[in-house]
């Protein structure tokens, strides 16, 4: 097509309607959200079946939530240490 511009390999221009990515790093992928969802599923499944399944759901929910929160807090600490050390 005659009116199209070919993209350059080293273009720093942001296309219209796009945004520049933030400089903060994204959190690393983790299995804790899946464990939390499994805990909730076991909780509700245990409500209609037997108390042992409910108890497993409570344990999974608490363990996954604690692990996820701990991982997020640890990630923020290391990020701020890196930012502080760079300055």
Image (tube, helix red, strand yellow):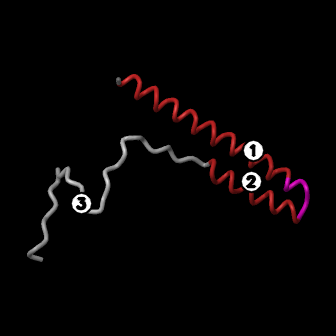
Q: Image quadrant of residue 71?
A: top right
- Reading the image, the residue beneath label 2 is 39
Label 1 CA crowd tier, 10 Å (few <14, some 14–19, many 20+) = some
Q: Where does the image place residue 56, in percent across and percent down from the top left?
A: 82, 51
Element assignment for label 3: loop
Residue, disc 3: 15
Residue closest to the eye, 5 or 49: 5
Q: Residue furthest bottom?
A: 1
Residue in view at x 63 percent, y 36 percent? 70
Q: CA distance from mark 1 to mark 2?
A: 8 Å
Q: Position of residue 64 (x, y in %)?
A: 69, 45
Q: Earlier in the sequence, mark 1 or mark 3?
A: 3
Numbered disc 1: secondary structure: helix
Q: Residues within 10 Å of mark 3 (few under 14, many from 20)?
A: few
Residue 40, given in percent of the width and then of the height, sits at 74, 57
At a point 29% along the width and 62% down the height, the residue shown is: 17
The answer to whether 62 is drawn above or below residue 19 in the figure is above
Q: Is residue 29 above or below residue 5?
A: above
Residue drawn at x 57%, y 39% as measured from the top left: 72
Which stretch is magenta? 49-54
**Does dot 2 land on a helix, a strand or a loop?**
helix
- Pair 2/3: label in front: 3
Classify the position of the N terminus by image quarter.
Answer: bottom left
Whether the residues at callouts 1 and 2 have beta carbons within 8 Å, the answer is: yes
Q: Residue reaching furthest front?
A: 17
Q: Mark 2 or mark 3, which has the lower sequence index?
A: 3
The image's mark for residue 62 is: 1
Whether the magenta-drawn stretch holds residue 7 is answered as: no
Task: Label the magenta part by its dominant secondary structure.
Answer: helix
Is 15 left or right of 51, judged from the image as shown?
left
Residue at 42% in and 28% down: 82
Instruction: Measure the C-alpha gap from mark 1 to mark 3.
Output: 44 Å
């Amino acid at each position: 097509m005659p009116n199209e511009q070919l993209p350059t390999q080293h273009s720093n221009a942001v296309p219209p309607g796009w945004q520049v990515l933030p400089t903060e790093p994204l959190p690393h992928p983790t299995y804790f959200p899946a464990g939390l969802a499994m805990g909730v599923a076991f909780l509700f499944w245990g409500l209609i079946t037997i108390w042992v399944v409910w108890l497993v759901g409570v344990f999974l929910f608490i363990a996954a939530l604690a692990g996820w929160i701990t991982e997020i807090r640890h990630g923020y600490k290391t990020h701020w240490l890196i930012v502080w050390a760079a300055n």
